Image: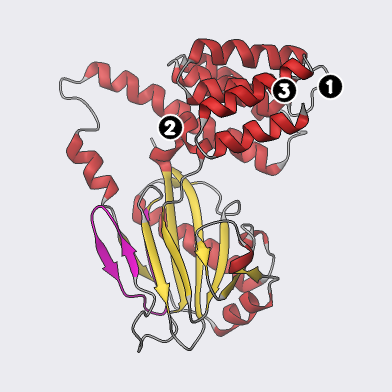
């Protein structure tokens, strides 16, 4: 049964919802009354937009979860289903109750916070839409958001470079994501590091993003990383959205930022141009350059220089201050 649950999770990650459903149901045939299996069913039906079945399965998961392990995750999925059903007040009630749970991890508390902000935003947006003659989010507004590219600059301190090099890293070839070739990278908790120059960078980037977007920026700690690209390093075309960003329409509030600590050797055939798609735009990095885009923006890069190319990346959520 555990193997079928895991297989169902892999199929869901790959977007094969029918196989995910079949594997999860097989798990329940072998071992009924598994709360995690019913939770997964709820998530699968949510992805399939069958909200009635999704709510039924997550209610079963919550009822069977007598040990109360992962109860916040179960409740958050319940809120995500209610969100899709536009039962915003009920979703807000669940998320607000979760905010009073002091036993949650910092990351789970953060996930509840952004879910609550997204739900309040959707509720207000829905109320405003019913009061306006012209609809919100016209095709032109959506197009403007997708093409958004903000370029800023921040000086690079030498001690920042030394601190970044001191952090434990792994080979790009050992990752399972879009990064390939010759190079190194850290985990995705770079800004949890307490080194002073890294903490200063985190604070500065948050302030720059806040000013650039005129939005309230949530924490940068939970999806931040450092890459060292050497000759032959490249990234396939990709965006920075996750499967869970569909919940609470978080994809509407997610942004990605890259900070070029050192652009490396640019006197070569492929100097690490940041290539954007739909609309297309090529950006040649400069030392200290910051590029900020919506996380849905597809991009790629290829580097063949002889000197290390250093960059810090971060994905975060931002909400209207009102």
Which quadrant is home to the C terminus?
Answer: top left
Q: Is residue 292 rendered magenta in the image?
A: yes
Residue drawn at (51%, 17%) of the image = 82
- What residue is shown with label 3? 27
Instruction: Tell me the magenta residue range.
Output: 274-293
Which quadrant is home to the N terminus?
Answer: top right
Element assignment for label 2: helix
Percent from the top left, x then y, of residue 301?
A: 39, 68
Q: Is residue 287 rendered magenta in the image?
A: yes
- What residue is shown with label 2? 249
Mark with earlier residue (3, 1): 3
Can residue 164 be seen here? yes
Residue drawn at (57%, 18%) of the image = 93
Q: Which of the two discs, 3 and 1, sits closer to the camera?
A: 3
Foreground of the two, 265 or 157: 265
Left or right, 235 with reference to 108: left
Mark with earlier residue (2, 3): 3
Left or right, 212 with reference to 133: right
Q: Do residues under tags 3 and 1 come within 8 Å of each other at their CB atoms?
A: no
Q: Residue furthest right?
A: 67
Q: Which mark is residue 67?
A: 1
Q: Which of the two discs, 2 and 3, sits closer to the camera?
A: 3
Mark with earlier residue (2, 1): 1
Left or right, 283 with reference to 304: left
227 vs 298: above or below: below
Residue drawn at (52%, 25%) of the image = 18
Q: CA distance from mark 2 to mark 3?
A: 30 Å
């Amino acid at each position: 049964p555990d193997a079928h649950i895991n297989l169902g999770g892999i199929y869901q990650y790959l977007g094969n919802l029918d196989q995910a459903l079949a594997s999860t149901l097989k798990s329940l045939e072998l071992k009924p009354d598994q709360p995690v299996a019913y939770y997964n069913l709820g998530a699968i039906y949510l992805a399939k937009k069958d909200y009635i079945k999704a709510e039924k399965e997550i209610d079963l998961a919550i009822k069977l979860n007598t040990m109360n392990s992962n109860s916040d995750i179960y409740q958050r999925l319940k809120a995500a289903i209610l969100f899709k059903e536009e039962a915003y007040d009920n979703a807000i009630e669940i998320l607000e109750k979760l905010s009073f749970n002091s036993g949650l991890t910092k990351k789970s508390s953060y996930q509840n916070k952004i879910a609550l902000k997204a739900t309040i935003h959707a509720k207000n947006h829905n109320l405003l839409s019913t009061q306006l003659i012209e609809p919100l989010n016209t095709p032109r507004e959506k197009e403007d958001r997708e093409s958004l590219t903000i370029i800023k600059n921040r000086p690079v301190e030498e001690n920042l470079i030394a601190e970044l090099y001191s952090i434990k890293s792994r080979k790009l070839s050992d990752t399972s994501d879009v990064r390939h070739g010759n190079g190194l990278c850290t985990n995705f908790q770079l800004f949890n590091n307490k080194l002073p120059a890294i903490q200063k960078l985190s604070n500065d980037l948050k302030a720059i993003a806040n000013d650039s977007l005129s939005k309230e920026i949530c924490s940068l700690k939970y999806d931040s990383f450092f890459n060292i690209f050497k000759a032959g390093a490249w990234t396939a075309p990709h965006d920075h959205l996750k499967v869970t960003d569909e919940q609470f329409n978080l994809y509407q509030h997610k942004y990605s930022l890259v900070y070029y600590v050192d652009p490396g050797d640019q006197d070569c055939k492929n100097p690490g141009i940041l290539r954007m798609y739909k609309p297309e735009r090529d950006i040649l990095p400069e030392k200290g350059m910051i590029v900020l885009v919506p996380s849905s923006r597809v991009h790629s890069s290829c580097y063949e220089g002889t000197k290390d190319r250093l960059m810090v990346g971060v994905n975060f959520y931002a909400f209207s201050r009102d």
